[in-house]
């Protein structure tokens, strides 16, 4: 019986360590705002890309708390223009016709890397995605602009 309990505890510990190997996106509060441009499905596609990025190694131990659609006003020609310039500078296709921006709040782990304050809350962190007409979203820029 002791061997079985020890084995089960070991499995639980390993699962917990594996779960900590990436960012946490399980309890994210989503705010879709009000958009006359994008549907909730459009936004969900973009949000999944943000969550996928948040689950990469560079976000290890971070806790994503919320994602909010910025506004239709941010999806304008000026922002589309600088995003095209950014794509071109990074040798990417700049033929997209739509952009969308979300802001997120997250908490860093105690052992955050040098570019982050440890055990800190960050608010209004921006995520910019682009696409051509109604194709798939592509994450182009993130951070504070």
Image (cartoon, grey):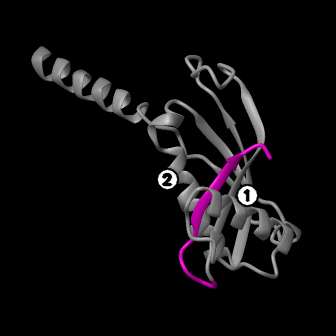
Do the numbered discs 2 and 1 sit on residues whose CB atoms are within 8 Å? no
Residue at 58%, 22% (x, y): give it. 112
Element carrying mark 1: strand
Q: What SS does tag 2 mark?
A: helix
**What residue do we see at 66% from left, 20% from top?**
119
* Coordinates of residue 122 in the picture (x, y in percent): 74, 34
- Reply above or below: 83 against 104: below
Q: Is residue 35 magenta?
A: no
Q: Residue furthest top?
A: 2
Circle 2 crowding by C-alpha within 10 Å: few under 14, some 14–19, many from 20: few
Q: Taking 126 as reference, is 54 left or right?
A: left
Q: CA distance from mark 2 to mark 1?
A: 14 Å
Q: Nearer the viewer, residue 125 or 15?
A: 125
Q: Which residues are magenta?
A: 133-145
Residue, disc 2: 52
Which mark identifies residue 102? 1
Rendering coords of residue 65 (x, y %)? 67, 42
Specify the quadrant of the image occupied by residue 106.
top right
Residue 90, horizontal then vertical, whole percent: 59, 56
Whichever of callouts 2 and 1 sits on the residue coming sooner in the sequence is 2
Tell me what residue is drawn at x 85 percent, y 68 percent: 78
Is 139 inside the magenta-drawn segment? yes
Instruction: Please tell me whether residue 135 is drawn above or below residue 2 in the rendered image.
Output: below
């Amino acid at each position: 019986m002791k061997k079985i309990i020890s084995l089960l505890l070991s499995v639980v510990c390993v699962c917990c360590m594996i779960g900590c190997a990436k960012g946490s996106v399980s309890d994210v509060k989503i705010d879709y705002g009000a958009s006359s441009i994008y549907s909730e499905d459009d936004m969900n596609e973009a949000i999944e890309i943000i969550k996928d990025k948040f689950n990469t190694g560079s976000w290890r131990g971070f806790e994503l708390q919320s994602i909010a659609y910025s506004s239709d006003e941010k999806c304008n020609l000026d922002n589309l223009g600088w995003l095209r310039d950014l794509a071109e500078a990074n040798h990417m296709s700049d033929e997209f016709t739509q952009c969308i921006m979300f802001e997120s709040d997250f908490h860093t782990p105690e052992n955050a890397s040098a570019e982050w304050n440890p055990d800190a809350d960050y608010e209004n962190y921006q995520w910019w995605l682009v696409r051509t007409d109604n194709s798939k979203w592509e994450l182009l820029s993130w951070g504070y602009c």
